Amino acid sequence: MDAIDAQRRARWHNPELPSLADRRVLLVGAGSLAGAIAERLRPFEVELTIVARTARDGVHGVDELPVLLPDADIVVLAVPGSAQTHHLLDAGGLAALPDGALVVNVARGGVVDTAALLAELESGRLRAALDVTDPEPLPADHPLWHAPHTIITAHQGGNSDATYSRVAALLRRQLEHLLAGEPLENVVART
């Protein structure tokens, strides 16, 4: 944001900034979106820890969050919205994060306790990048719009000129899998 402000004022502003390299990133989610995020983070040489509903080889269970949060520089939330993930990152979880930590929510707004996050942001202790909010859409008079160290986008994560061609390709593959009796892609839960 400082760079954008400096550009608008035609001011050369060249501070030393924190790097993504060597940061401890806690990726909460292990589905296809989380996998794509992990692929994009690895070239930046982050220390990546993945958390899913249940622990397995190379993946921590969600029950380990209280132990993992205090060491996270960045928490990326990429889980489906459900009763189990509602306020997954609550006041206690947010308080456990170290000063200056960044909360990135590309999941659902309700995954984070908005009131607790707002308190942390207004204190200046945490930072946030939110593609989703609770409530959504965020009302014009909501204080989250003006919280310091916060970037909000209006649920734009999948809204690009590549979306429709990718959806069509996935639909085609899913139909081919279905016709061939093969397992479908991106299955979240079986009933």
Image (cartoon, grey):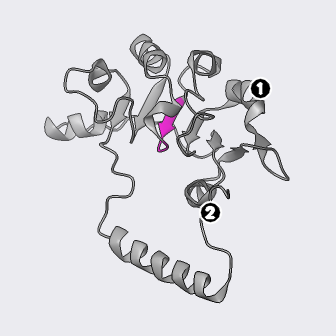
* Front position among marks 1 and 2: 2
Q: Is residue 29 magenta?
A: no
Quarter-wise, where is residue 11 in the image?
top left
- Classify residue 71 as left or right of residue 132: right
Residue 131: image location, x then y, percent: 39, 42
Give whichever of discs 1 and 2 has the lower sequence position: 1
Q: What residue type is labelled 1?
A: Val
Which residue was labeled with disc 2? 187
Inspect this view and state whether residue 16 appears. no
Q: Tell whether label 2 touches label 1 (CB within 8 Å).
A: no
Q: Which residue lies furthest to the front in this view?
A: 191
* The N terminus: image quadrant: top left
Q: Which residue lies furthest to the left in this view?
A: 9
State the count of labels.
2
Is residue 106 rendered magenta in the image?
yes
Residue carrying label 1: 67
Taken as a whole, is the magenta stretch helix, strand or loop?
strand
In the image, residue 94 sits, relative to residue 37, either above or below, namely above
